[in-house]
Image: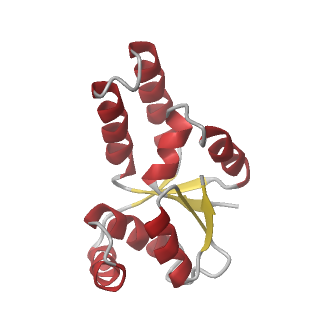
Amino acid sequence: MPAFWDTSAIVHLCVPSPSSSTARHLLRDHAPVIWWCTPVEARSAIERLYAERALSLPAYRAATQRAAAMLGAWREIQPTDGLRELAFEALAKFQLRAADSLQLAAAQVWCRRKPHSRVFVSNDIKLLAAAADLGFVTRSV
């Protein structure tokens, strides 16, 4: 069953962490649907971790290769005017950061604004709360 995966969850599939095991288990059950900008956000997180020396050069290379391989294979929600309007609504209702409002809007586009029984995967507590408020079943990594 597909699920919407926010960037914070995707990064745990690319970069080893205590949450990576949980993310891999969720991946077995929920094929990812991602927002169009998720590949850029994931790469940004990997670059930041490398710049902060939280990743060695081999770990950095492995993470970027995993990200490229995975992100190109998943269903991607494209930017539209309607998605932007949903992001504006999310900003007003949930006081999210811009990127998070776009993630939530993309999830709503994916399920045609009928999130009942649809899964939203994230590692961001505030974003998970907003998704749950809209009716998504949430899973944390």
Which residue is located at x 68 percent, y 77 percent?
A: 117
Residue 116: x %, y % from top left: 64, 82
Which residue is located at x 27 percent, y 26 percent?
A: 51
Left or right: residue 83 compared with residue 125: left
Between residue 57 and residue 118, name the one nearer to us.
57
Which residue is located at x 34 percent, y 23 percent?
A: 53
Residue 108: x %, y % from top left: 47, 76
Left or right: residue 134 compared with residue 80: right
Residue 29: x %, y % from top left: 73, 53
Tell me where residue 99 sits by quadrant. bottom left
The N terminus: image quadrant = bottom right
Above/below status of 58 relative to 79:
above
Left or right: residue 29 compared with residue 6: right
Q: Count the marks: how many?
A: 0
Above/below status of 128 relative to 113:
above
Between residue 81 and residue 5, name the one nearer to us.
5
Above/below status of 41 relative to 48:
below
Coloring applied to the structure:
secondary structure
The single residue placed furthest to the top in the displayed view is 58
Tell me where residue 61 sits by quadrant. top left
